[in-house]
Image: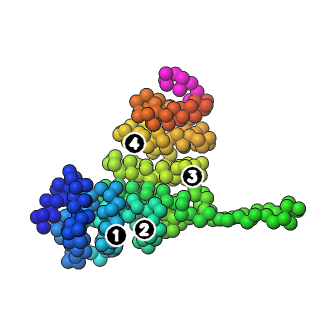
Amino acid sequence: MASIKLLQNIAPYMCQELADALRSPGGQLSSLINVIAEDNGISEEQAAAVGLLADLPESDTGLTRRLLGEGAFRIAFSKVVSIRQGITRGGRFVTRFLEGLVSVLSRLTYILEGEPEVIALAREYSLASLFTDLLQMNELDKVQRVSALSLQNLSKQSKHLTKVPVVPEPGIFCSIFPCLGKQPVITGLCRVHRGFCSIEHSFCLLEGKAVEKLVACLDHTNEKVVEAALAALCTLLDDDVDIDQGVSVLDEADGIKPILDILSDNRTEILRQKAVWAVERILRNDDIANEIAGDQNVGTALVEAFRHGDYRTRQIAERALKQVDKLPNFSGIFTKKGG
């Protein structure tokens, strides 16, 4: 017990060294997982063990694969479900235990790219639905933040996993009689990903009703939660999706104003970078751009980002300013304040 607590205390300062040690033969990774798997309530030792694993870097894919091979994710998933369903009773250490379990489980979402077996496991565990539900644990900032980051990772895969319908080529008969070659109307397509989506199969935020829950996190007092929620929502505005429809989805979920507020508030540099990126894409939608044309705070915040942001942020802010400068209520703001 004492050794696990000691390792957990030093993990934030030596996380990669600990990950390397645990990954090595005889590194006691199995012992930690066995402690977490115990079914005698929730002990301090279990909370410390899972907390130690939670502090190790998500970027260490080798460790993630070792955890996968050791069955750690199956255990973490079953424990989270057990706590959520009230099968495992709470106690002094339940919050720490749950936070650690969610962080461990989230590691799966960092190795989805090009990994059919991992994607299949994420589907089996309904991870997108689980993390969407966990967003509503309002008193647990860490759980909300990790859940939003996991949804970001899952949502990035939606454009690859959506089932795009195959429209048959018109035959020679239709080329002779064009009136008979009308393409069939396909219903039920995801507006953003242009295919057949679901929360379970393609991890689609729209189909999973996750958009509203992420928007609700945008006014969170914890900036890290806001950063994670905004990052997840930005996947609806990514390249290779229908950005115009992504903007409409955000608008319908009342998500535009909170993003504009984040831009104006300038709470952290990370938030400013993400908000500038999102607002530039939002302004590509003419209807939405005209709706917010009366908000001079937007133009002022973009000018500040253009002046004081990093190189990439300045470039994006410049594009956004050129876009808003076309609008009557914003006319001249770029030339007046951008110089």
Is 282 positioned to the left or the right of 94 in the image? right
Task: Write the residue at 60% across / 38% down.
Answer: 290
Q: Quadrant of residue 3?
A: bottom left
Q: Which residue is mark 4?
A: 271
Label 3 to label 1: alpha-carbon separation: 31 Å
Quadrant (top left/top right/bottom left/bottom right) for the N terminus: bottom left
Residue 331 inside the magenta-drawn segment = yes
Q: Is residue 82 visible?
A: yes
Task: Write the residue at 25% across / 59% down.
Answer: 19
Discs 2/4, front: 2
Q: Amino acid at mark 2?
A: Val
Is 96 positioned to the left or the right of 200 in the image? left
Q: Which residue is mark 3?
A: 240
Label 2 to label 1: alpha-carbon separation: 9 Å
- Whichever of labels 3 and 1 marks the residue nearer the N terminus, that label is 1
Residue 68 is labelled as 1
Q: Which residues are magenta?
A: 330-339
Discs 1/4, front: 1
Label 2 to label 3: alpha-carbon separation: 23 Å
Question: Disc 1 on helix, strand or loop?
Answer: helix
Q: Which residue is mark 2?
A: 118
